[in-house]
Image (cartoon, helix red, strand yellow):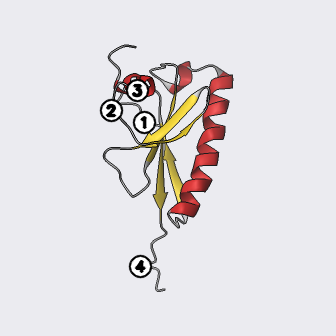
Amino acid sequence: MSDCIFCKIIRGEIPAEKTYEDDSVVAFLDIHPKSPGHTLVVPKEHYHWFIEMPDELSDTMFRAAKKISQKLKDEYAADYIRLSIVGRDVPHTHIHLIPQKLSTEGLGV
């Protein structure tokens, strides 16, 4: 889709801080991060909704997300990586990977 912002990033028409790329998937830092390291994982081929993607591509995308999540967890000393697929803000399937720390507030620790 020619006017999709993620397609433009994939084509190199809009700059982004890419952190991962293979034949099918690209990952880059979110421009409005929820936490340091907030990363978006997108398929290079445009699909509006996750359920429209071929199974092989969604499998590849999740394998990439898993690999990137481990890197983010290590790099940001995160306790876990929050993963979500929302798709309302940009109509191109994407996975949010957000490094998180466990809060001890209210736990009596």
Mark 4 residue element: loop
Picture quarter with the N terminus: top left
Mark 3 residue element: loop
Q: What residue is disc 2 on? A: 89
Q: Count neighbours of disc 3 (C-alpha within 10 A) and say few if under 14, some if 14 to 19, many if 20 or more.
A: few
Residue placed furthest toward the top = 2
Q: Which mark is residue 86?
A: 1
Residue 100 position (above or below residue 10): below
**Marks 2/1: CA distance?**
8 Å
Q: Earlier in the sequence, mark 3 or mark 2?
A: 3
**Marks 4/3: CA distance?**
46 Å
* Image marks 3 and 2: residues in contact by CB distance under 8 Å: no
Q: Earlier in the sequence, mark 4 or mark 3?
A: 3
**Marks 1/3: CA distance?**
24 Å
Q: Residue at (36%, 53%) from the top-left corner?
A: 34
Mark 2 residue element: loop
Amino acid beneath label 3: Gly
Q: What residue is disc 3 on? A: 12
Amino acid beneath label 2: Asp
The spot of residue 25 in percent (x, y) is: 56, 30
Residue 78 position (above or below residue 96): below
Q: What residue is disc 4 on? A: 106
The spot of residue 37 in percent (x, y) is: 44, 54
Q: Count neighbours of disc 4 (C-alpha within 10 A) and say few if under 14, some if 14 to 19, many if 20 or more.
A: few
